[in-house]
Amino acid sequence: MERLDQQRAPIYEALERFGKMRVVPFDVPGHKRGRGNPELVELLGQQCVSMDVNSMKPLDNLCHPISVIRDAEILAAQAFGAAHAFLMVGGTTSAVQSMILSVAKRGEKIILPRNVHRSVMGAMVLCGAVPVYVNPECDHRLGIPLGMSVSAVEKAIRENPDAKAVLVNNPTYYGICSDLRSIVKLAHDNGMLCLADEAHGTHFYFGENLPVSAMAAGADMAAVSMHKSGGSLTQSSLLLTGPAMPEGHVRQIINLTQTTSGSYLLLSSLDISRRNLALRGKQEFKRVSELAEYARKEINAIGGYYAFSKELCNGDSIFDFDTTKLSVNTLDVGLAGIEVYDLLRDEYDIQIEFGDLGNILAYLSIGDRPREVERLVSALAEVRRRFGGSKAGLMQQEYIDPIVAASPQEAFYAEKESLPIEDTAGRICSEFVMCYPPGIPILAPGERITKEILDYIQYAKAKGCSMTGPEDADILRLNVLK
Amino acid sequence: MDFWFSEAQTPNVKLSIKVDKQLFSGKSEFQRIDVFEAPEFGRFLTLDGYMMLTEKDEFIYHEMITHVPMAVHPKVRDVLVIGAGDGGVIRELTRYPEIEHIDMVEIDPLVVEVCKKYLPQTSCRLNDPRLTIHYEDGVRFIRSCKDQYDLIIVDSTDPFGPGEGLFTREFYGSCYNALREDGIMVNQHESPFYAEDAVACQRAHKRIVESFPISRVYQAHIPTYPSGHWLFGFASKKYHPLRDLDETRWNMRGLTCRYYTTTLHKGAFYLPAYVEELLRDVEQEC
């Protein structure tokens, strides 16, 4: 074996070698290099279906890696400054779940902000852990939840000394970072682990002048969406661990829920993307930051829109801002974010990442070019000219302090009944309700439903937010505890 | 020795032109640029391997994209030209003394430089004192313009490449906003003939119809473009391309053209049945 360095891509190289061996497949997948499914070959191409192969000796096995996957994990760990890196093929959802399941059992507490992704709550339904929420502060002009202040985390730790871990969004969907270094220290000083949801933070490991990454800050685990800013295929992800986490234990946890037929398309995309980021990430993300900076300047020049950035930093709940994120507040244009989101798609053939009540997020990445950014800015100017109006009647998104009346697991599995949504105020919800994206629950299992929350759901539906979660897909009824 | 330039007009159709020699080949930030000399067509310019113009038939395109709106609008003073790095549109526009100012926005400085050097037939008026050349993205340039042009000519490449932004709703909306209350926009409108071009043509038409109260399409015969049958869009806030055509006024100017006449102007708006249908299909969606 040649020396392992970041120029290498062991899984990709193994696939290349394997292709040349012309092995006769009497194993799965049954399409047999595409021969059994010509329409699929037509769609995806011969190259792609030829690489859709099964775990085998020359290609290693994701559940128990000992050769090329192992090497790819070692290289990824080096590139990200982690003690170990696990290649994940069930999305960052599976990385987040494995992270929670690795540190907490039934009845154990995890300290976290309420604006976490649904996968965090999902993991708590699975393992029975109990959330202790830290109120993320809210910016009233923008109506977005911010990071956790260090003092709020300190208070939660003081009140819950038995908690097992603190979980931090690094960054939030909007690009806002908490003071991760201080929070890690606080957690460790109190015998707790620190976990980071870095679904939107892959580039922190490679770019310059970006917020600190979880591994650099000393966190114990981080779920990193390589397929978002890292450029790998959708559904591929990384779970990083620090020196305090036993690798074998985490592997066991991952294998509880992850497929035993890991896709080599996803695995090789992780391998190649890691190599690309390690070799060229610095200049690539510099370009992305500059493009976002340019877009902010142009969007702010239109009038009405507010494309925000580092000027929001306050040293605590907005400790840092990810300048590659293009988050834009739309309220002064007289349109809800979700309305701008819909107009961009329906009128201008521009698909952005999400729109909420007051903001939109356009996702910029290593694949963007100036000419598309020009289109986005022009389309925003046109949306304002054609559809802009008065701000009156637009609802601000406010942080609604959740009342946790039961653990997510208890509530999810409890005896329940279905009620018309308007009759549910005061009851305990047994399911999730969220706008997707961003996929942050408005209600999670175990939370008490209030009139305020119902008003919010009603307004979000009326504005055209796509709501998901409940058993009743139209969200006319909700399941509540009996 | 045989030396041929070939362009795949569709995946299944090729146009080949016998070449004497290649005069230039280079790559800019945006595209590959080549200039050839051919016995049949004289010099010709290609971008990313797609035919832009030949000395033999460029007059058709440049006359038709310029004189049609100029014969309709009674007083054009300020003109914005998007693209047009070869200078052909500018050459035609500078024949009108009443035009006071022309802004030309070309994304690629190398195109202009190459055309100035190798294609003097079209680039001959790029030093006109009324002309200001801006090297930037047309989508960006026009975003901040409001109520300041009488005529906008969109001389773009195809909508698959650097020119894509010039076929969008946001761009046409910005054009509308940049025109005075009686302004006209004319654009290169692709061909209706081959399937992929026809779809591009329909999409462009739909977006223009959505953006302007008057939107008509006219045609010309351009031998070196795919299928030879080419369309232009005439979009306007006030003037109708036929009802407001002032033939006498234009003919009194005494401009001599090789393709355009005011009689042809009228005929150019009468389209083949299948083209009418293609356009009507998207108009109904608006």
Image (cartoon, coloured by chain):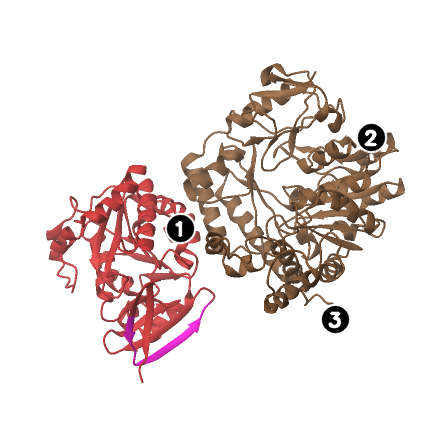
Q: Residue at x 25, y 57 (%)?
A: B230
Q: Nearer the viewer, residue A49 or A123?
A: A49
How far separated are the C-alphas under marks 3 and 1? 58 Å
Identity, as a three-letter code, of the amino acid under mark 3: Met
Residue A251 screen position, x and y as percent: 78, 49
The chain painted red is: B
Q: Residue at x 62, y 36 (%)?
A: A439
Mark 3: few/some/many CA within 10 Å (<14, 14-19, 20+)? few
Identify the residue under disc 2: A107
Q: Which residues are magenta?
A: B16-28
Q: Secondary structure at mark 3?
A: loop
The image's mark for residue A1 is 3
Identity, as a three-letter code, of the amino acid under mark 2: Gly
- Where, by quadrant of the figure, is residue A75 drawn? bottom right
Q: Is residue B286 visible?
A: no
Q: Are dots 3 and 2 in contact, CB under 8 Å?
A: no
How far separated are the C-alphas under marks 3 and 2? 47 Å
**Chain letter of the residue beneath label 3 in the structure image:** A
Please give left or right for residue B216 compared with residue B45 in the image.
left
Q: Main secondary structure of the magenta part?
A: strand
Mark 1: few/some/many CA within 10 Å (<14, 14-19, 20+)? many
Q: Residue at x 75, y 59 (%)?
A: A70
